[in-house]
Image (tube, helix red, strand yellow):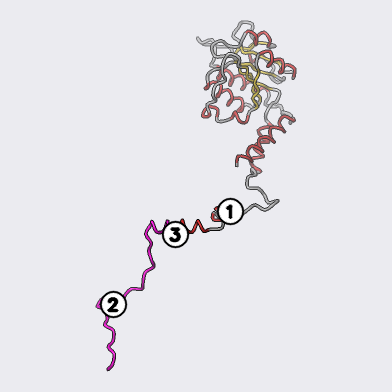
Amino acid sequence: MRGLAPKRSPFGEPPPPSPVHLDVPTVWVLWLLGSLQNPFPRSSLQGELPKAEGALSSTMITPRRRERFRQVLERRHDDLVVVLENIHDAHNASAILRSCDAFGVGRIALVYNNQVFPQIASGVAAQVDKWLQIERFESAEACLSALQAEGLQVYATHLTSAAQDYLSVDFTQPSAIVLGNEHAGCSEEMIELADASIIIPMHGFVQSLNVSVAAAVTLSEIARQRRDLLPAWTSRKAELEHAWIERETERR
């Protein structure tokens, strides 16, 4: 008896078998079991390869970044220092630091003996404090003794008839500018120990500018007087450049 041909489905040939689809819990279980049995470290699964000795480290900063460091330091004046004495407002202190960086002043001296140095506002200061050399002193005497020993002329901003117009001062010479507390101004000790007092003449009803504005105005005049001077490359700058490179390398 001849065999009968298989009966065809009215819907055509059956579709090929589909791959097995696993539900989500099953996939996670299989992945977990596989990871427990995997003899390779997790870094190998991520495609990380051990660094060969002598290979170029990926943490090294770029030549462009190094050049930026050098350009900033070459324009800075090591014989120019801004002194903050008991300035208590965070906005003012932050704005002064930003102006210092903008006008090529890298050295800041702090004298805080009746105030706590305020928390720097990163938005106002644009995080420039990490690029500045900030030194703290316990007293006005300790600060000015150190600066004058370097040969710097110290000018205290002080509202008095005996003060010099800041435009008449020769700021091309090594100088330090003292900015005092917003309400009390510079201390009596600071004024007595300074080489001179300076003011920004006012032509309106107010007697003085906000301390951060006064700092920017004074630094602008200093930058104008020094615009044709080429600051020397010093050991201080070399050490700072090295410190910046190390810090940036560690951060990456």
- Magenta stretch: give its range: 1-29
Q: Where is residue 7 in the image (x, y as percent from the top left)?
A: 26, 82
Q: Name the residue under label 2.
A: 12
- Dividing the picture into quadrants, the one containing residue 212 is top right
Residue bearing mark 3: 30
Percent position (x, y) of residue 68?
64, 37
Q: Which residue lies furthest to the bottom in this view?
A: 1
The answer to whether residue 17 is magenta is yes
**Amino acid at circle 3:** Leu
Q: Which of 111 and 125 is in front in this view?
A: 111
Q: How far apart are marks 1 and 3 (CA)?
A: 24 Å
Measure how far apart labels 1 and 2 are at the Cα level.
52 Å
| Three-letter code for the amino acid on which mark 2 is drawn | Gly
- Look at 71% across and 31% down and name the residue there: 237
Front of the two marks 1 and 2: 1
Which SS class for mark 1?
loop
Q: How many numbered marks have been drawn onto this rendered protein structure?
A: 3
Nearest the eye: 193 or 99? 193
Q: Residues within 10 Å of mark 3 (few under 14, many from 20)?
A: few
Give the residue number, with chain letter if any, for mark 1: 48
Binning the other alpha carbons within 10 Å of mark 1 as few (below 14), some (14 to 19) or many (20 upward) gives few
Choose the circle earlier in sequence order: 2 or 3.
2
Q: Which amino acid does label 1 sit on?
A: Glu
